[in-house]
Image (cartoon, rainbow, N blue to C red):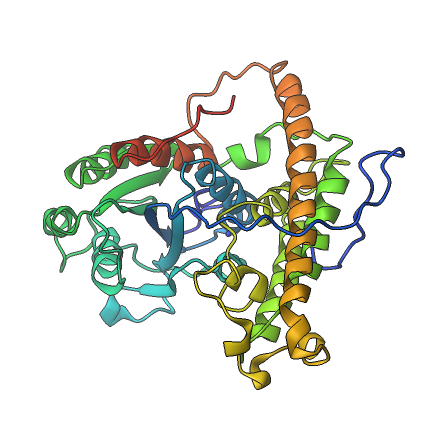
Amino acid sequence: MALSFRIAALAAAVALAVGVALPLNAADEPKPAKPPVEVKAVEGKPIDLVICLDVSGSMDGLIASAKIQLWNVVNELARIKPTPNLRVAIYSYGASRFDAKKGWVNKEVDLTEDLDEVYKVLNGLKTGGGDELVARVTKTAIEDQKWSTDKDALKVIFVCGNEPVNQDKQVNLEDVAGMAKKAGIVVNTIYCKWGHDTEIAAWAEFAKTCGGKHVNIDQNRAAQQVVVKTEFDDQIIKLGEELNKTYVAYGADGKNKAENQAKQDANAKGAAPAAPGAAPTAALERSLTKAGGLYRNATWDLVDKMKEKDFDIKKIKEEDLCDELKKIKPEERLAYLKKKAGERDELQKKIADLSAKRQKKVHEERAKTTKTDTEKALDEAFKGIIREQAKTKGFEVAPEKK
């Protein structure tokens, strides 16, 4: 079925050209990178987040919203203390090109901490008419994924879409709710309004039966949000691009992952809202994500891997090293990685400082506008629900930003 802005829901959850970092002001002098402080990362509790997206019919609005809002939602999760171990998975459902025997459900990506891969998937989503079987996609996600076994883990599914929630004639919603509760998984529903409000009650009831929450979405809100342009925007984006230079790839897939990092920078830039003169919202939020604790790439980046306990550069096979490290004497390689870590730390601090200044100005400008609508936008729905459910698992949730 055709639906122009399908749910601005994703996330929930997910600037190519490498730029040159600009000084914060003319008085700033270039400073040598400081070596990173040797601090062991505090192990946060797991958050497993599975997003199920209805892709039947036209969902240009959904894709556009996902590109903009994924990083915004991730940045909200990064405010939870201690910083959680976040993994994200994505399922799409309702497209006729999918296997009918599987209920027109397609697993796009398994639970992963590789947020660049998640964003790549979001940017590759396509539409196609079909039956939207909410029970089937929820059941598939519960059974397919290797959910965290940590007793304190927050395990959440968001099912996003519309049309009748009970279309599945083979899988019963009540049975799925029982499966979710037994597995300790909370199922939330996000309904994208399209003029058929009689469908809403059943969506809300399914979420309630699963121990979750329900939210209605105004699919047009993503395009209507106030976009504030500040003098800090371009600097934040360029500093985010500059961070790429601090990554030291390794392993068979290291080069491809580094290239994908740059591609997703470009995709974030391309997801800019249609506001004259405004900076790309997704690119800004992505830069903040890359400067935070949830952007982890230890599977292909040696600077991140160096944070792991008992890391030893000598244990990395020579053939798995990138060309830049192969050129360095073995005894000098660890110092090289520490130098890169220091450079990254400095860039991340600059981004955090600029972000605080930008946020202050954004809040001041948005305070001048009057909110009269009652429905939420995609990121608001995701963040509000996750904040509430994180508290029930003992996470320390920072005060909500206004």
Q: Image quadrant of residue 94?
A: bottom left
Q: What residue is at 73 percent from the left and 31 percent from the top?
A: 229
Residue 56 can be seen in this image = no
Count the marks: how many? 0
Q: Can you see residue 287? A: yes
Would you place residue 321 above or below residue 368 in this image? Answer: below
Q: Is residue 16 above or below residue 97?
A: above
Considering depth in this image, is 318 or 259 the residue closer to the camera?
A: 318
Extreme bottom residue here?
319
Compared across the picture, whether 75 is left or right of 135 comes to right
Residue that appears at 50% across and 58% down: 307
Residue 236 image position (x, y, % from top left)? 71, 41
In front of the other: 297 or 112: 297
Relative to the observer, which residue lies in front, 232 or 334?
Answer: 334
Please provide percent x and percent y for residue 392: 25, 33
Judge left or right: residue 358 versus residue 215.
Answer: right
Residue at point 24%, 54% (across, down): 138
Q: Viewed as shown, does residue 234 lie left or right of 356?
A: right
The residue sitting at the right extreme is: 26
Residue that protrudes farthest toward the front in the picture? 331
Q: Position of residue 89 (x, y in %)?
A: 38, 57
Q: Position of residue 363 (x, y in %)?
A: 61, 21
